[in-house]
């Protein structure tokens, strides 16, 4: 089993650690030149503020809704990232730091453990020690862990984690093929033209057809959707 732990709205969450009054209000963080939005709180997303949207397009929206605006502080974000990653290392024998706010944890051999309880413990510990919220997706492969994490984030009534084990067909049907990790825009458009609209459709596609049109990389993704590990953790 593999876990993907991802900090929710990372830049915004970092700003909120040092200003708790920002919790529950719309917040955006801007790019280096303060030209575009590079991070949004859930409240800002609800206002239809888009990722990468130029600030000049939403000045009235910002003013009307009292959106709190911050310039990027990459020194702060780098320090907070290190704190999160150091906290996560205690939860698994090996870990891949995938990005500034994402890590894969190797849960191999832990299948008999209560993985839901483990996920809760991860979330509670990171919150208590660092002060940022994380989502946790646990599944047999990295691609499925990405999907589990995505579903955990979208489920506002959930506990912030999702464990995929046994059968996950229902979950795959709820994910558009373009939202599968590793499927870019061109491949997504191609697949949709050929009736492959969801992650489930891709998992059911013919191996030879997938390899022909999506190369061996696409075939690995397809097999990972079926629960067969094909993408190794790049552990440190």
Image (spheres, grey):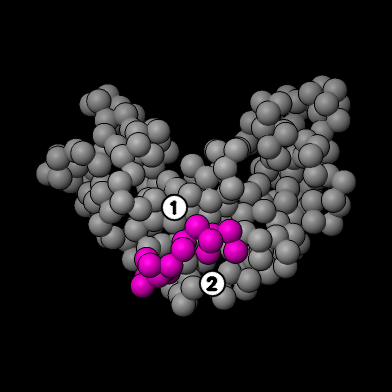
Residue 227 on the magenta span: no
Residue positioned 87% across, 46% down in the render? 21
- On screen, 109 above or below 220? below
Q: Is residue 32 visible?
A: no
Residue positioned 42% across, 38% down in the render? 179
- Give the x, y percent position of residue 35: 73, 38
Label 2: which residue?
A: 91
Along the horizontal axis of the image, is 154 left or right of 23? left
| Label whose residue precedes the other's in the sequence (2 or 1) | 2
Quarter of the image for the N terminus: give it.
bottom left
- Give the x, y percent position of residue 207: 15, 45
- Give the x, y percent position of residue 67: 82, 33
Q: Is residue 201 visible?
A: yes
Residue positioned 70% across, 45% down in the render? 31
- On screen, 127 above or below 182? below
Which stretch did the figure color magenta? 106-121
Q: Secondary structure at mark 1?
A: strand
Residue 163 — which label? Answer: 1
- On screen, 79 above or below 176? below
Nearer to us in this view, 37 or 170 = 170
Along the horizontal axis of the image, is 30 left or right of 99? right
Marks 2 and 1, how far apart at CA: 16 Å
Q: Secondary structure at mark 2?
A: helix
Residue 120 on the magenta span: yes
Residue positioned 68% across, 28% down in the render? 46
* Disc 2 residue crowd, few under 14, some 14–19, many 20+, Cα 10 Å: some
- Give the x, y percent position of residue 166: 31, 51
Along the horizontal axis of the image, is 174 left or right of 66? left
Find residue 138 and report its image quarter: bottom left
Residue 209 — which label? Answer: none
- On screen, 90 above or below 162? below
Nearer to us in this view, 27 or 172 = 172
């Amino acid at each position: 089993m593999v876990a993907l732990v991802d900090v929710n709205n990372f830049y915004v969450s970092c700003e909120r650690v040092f200003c708790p009054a920002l919790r529950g209000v719309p917040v955006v963080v801007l790019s280096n030149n303060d030209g575009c939005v590079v991070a949004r709180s859930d409240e800002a997303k609800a206002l239809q503020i888009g990722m990468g949207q130029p600030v000049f397009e939403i000045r009235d929206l910002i003013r009307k809704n009292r959106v709190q605006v911050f310039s990027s502080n990459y020194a702060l974000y780098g320090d907070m990232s290190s704190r999160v990653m150091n906290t996560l290392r205690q939860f698994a024998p090996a870990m891949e730091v995938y990005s500034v706010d994402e890590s894969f944890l190797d849960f191999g051999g832990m299948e008999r453990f209560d993985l839901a309880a483990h996920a809760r413990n991860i979330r509670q510990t990171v919150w208590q020690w660092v002060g940022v919220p994380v989502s946790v997706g646990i599944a047999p492969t990295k691609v499925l862990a990405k999907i589990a994490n995505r579903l955990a984030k979208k489920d506002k009534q959930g506990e912030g984690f999702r464990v995929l084990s046994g059968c996950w067909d229902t979950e795959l049907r709820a994910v558009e093929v373009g939202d599968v990790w590793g499927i870019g825009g061109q491949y997504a458009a191609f697949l949709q033209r050929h009736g492959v609209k969801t992650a489930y459709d891709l998992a059911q596609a013919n191996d030879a057809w997938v390899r022909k049109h999506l190369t061996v990389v696409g075939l690995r993704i397809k097999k990972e959707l079926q629960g067969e590990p094909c993408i190794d953790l790049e552990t440190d």
